[in-house]
Image (spheres, rainbow, N blue to C red):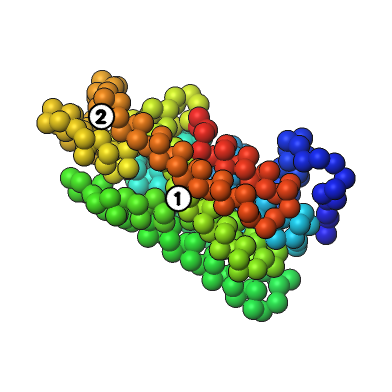
Amino acid sequence: MMSIDQHAAPITNDLVEERNRTILASVGDVLTTHVTGHSVAMGEMSAEVTSLTAAIVDMLGRGKRIRAQFCMWGSYGATGGELVEGVPEIAAAIELFHLAALVHDDLMDSSDTRRGLPTVHRQFAAGHTREQRLGDADNHGSAAAILVGDMLLSWSDDLAAMSTDSLDSRTRRTVRAMWSRMRDEAYAGQYLDMLSQTEVSTSRRRTDLILELKSAKYTISHPLRLGAAIAGGDDELLHLYDQIGLTAGAAFQLRDDLLGVFGDPQVTGKPAVDDIREGKRTLLMAVAESRAGDSQKQVLRHALGNPAVGDADLEAVRSVLTDTGADEAVEDRIRELTDNAMEILEYLPVDELTRTALTGLIERCVWRRS
């Protein structure tokens, strides 16, 4: 174990950044070792399959590791600053699970770019065309993306299991149940999101449920709780972490929804029109629809879920969102949710370094530009 004497110096951003560098390095080491091991093993089977693992390595190198950081800081909050065996592994497992979700999500949404790179299905479709292979290039790309996502899911489960090796049987069952719950909620949220895109409108209840299951829980709540559970956190801490996750995690997703329409693709790494083409029924769109006049509703109905939407349509939708005040309403909700999370943080029973770090992490999540 390694620890930090919280009384050695005042809590500063430099101390937080130093610990964050340690976190990113430890999680990066686990990911590199794990993925490299599988890459080598698969390469020995056939050099032709290394293109699958190469795509994973490229994407892993571009992630922010937000979920891993929440997981690690969640564990530090339970121990007062000690690093517990197994926590870097569960943090890395979350990152692989997240990447699997992105690969499959991009395929379902027919997205072209992710993290500034072509999405996996587009990469393999382009390779199929470039090499003049037989069959349909898009089908080949889709099949490859499914394989890559499945590989990431299974590798994440391997790491999650490894993270519990040194735990007693009761704690191991708790962590595994939490991990299983996280996966089920993410799958349920994804399906509800898909279902909402097949309807003219969706209920606020479903919109809120998608927000909770697909983002709030697995972006912040579960990472915090998994880290704390492995580190021996008590029920009170796990409950408070859950409350922080539900509020800050929802704010995180609402920011994502705004960036999905108003963000700069050069900064976000993905086109600003994707959410509109996919017909995402976000809170942003729900507020706009509830306030829109007839002509404005026509703009939204024409654009949402229309794969042929172009730049002019995007600008028209943006105008509706700003004219109805939907964008400001979502900003207000983000501020409200963030304030709620910060209130919980004030009386969270953790050391001051962890409190400062979690405050900074949440602020980065909800006020980010990408």
Image quadrant of residue 165? bottom right
Image quadrant of residue 300? top left
Q: Position of residue 114 (x, y in %)?
A: 47, 36
User: Given the current orientation, which residue lies at the most extreme bottom position?
Assistant: 169
**Which numbered disc covers residue 255?**
none
**Is residue 360 something that shows in the picture?**
yes
The residue under label 2 is 324
Q: Position of residue 356 (x, y in %)?
A: 68, 43
Q: Position of residue 4 (x, y in %)?
A: 83, 50
Name the kind of residue labelled 1 in the image. Ser
Q: Earlier in the sequence, mark 2 or mark 1?
A: 1
The residue under label 1 is 215
Mark 2 vs mark 1, CA separation in Å: 26 Å
- Please, what secondary structure does the residue beneath circle 2 have? loop
Q: Position of residue 62 (x, y in %)?
A: 59, 37
- For the N terminus, the quadrant is bottom right
Viewer-proximal residue, 145 or 20?
20
- Please, what secondary structure does the residue beneath circle 1 have? helix
Foreground label between 2 and 1:
2
Residue sitting at x 85%, y 41%: 9
Q: Pointer 1: residues within 10 angstroms few (<14), some, or many (20+)?
A: many
Viewer-proximal residue, 20 or 204?
204
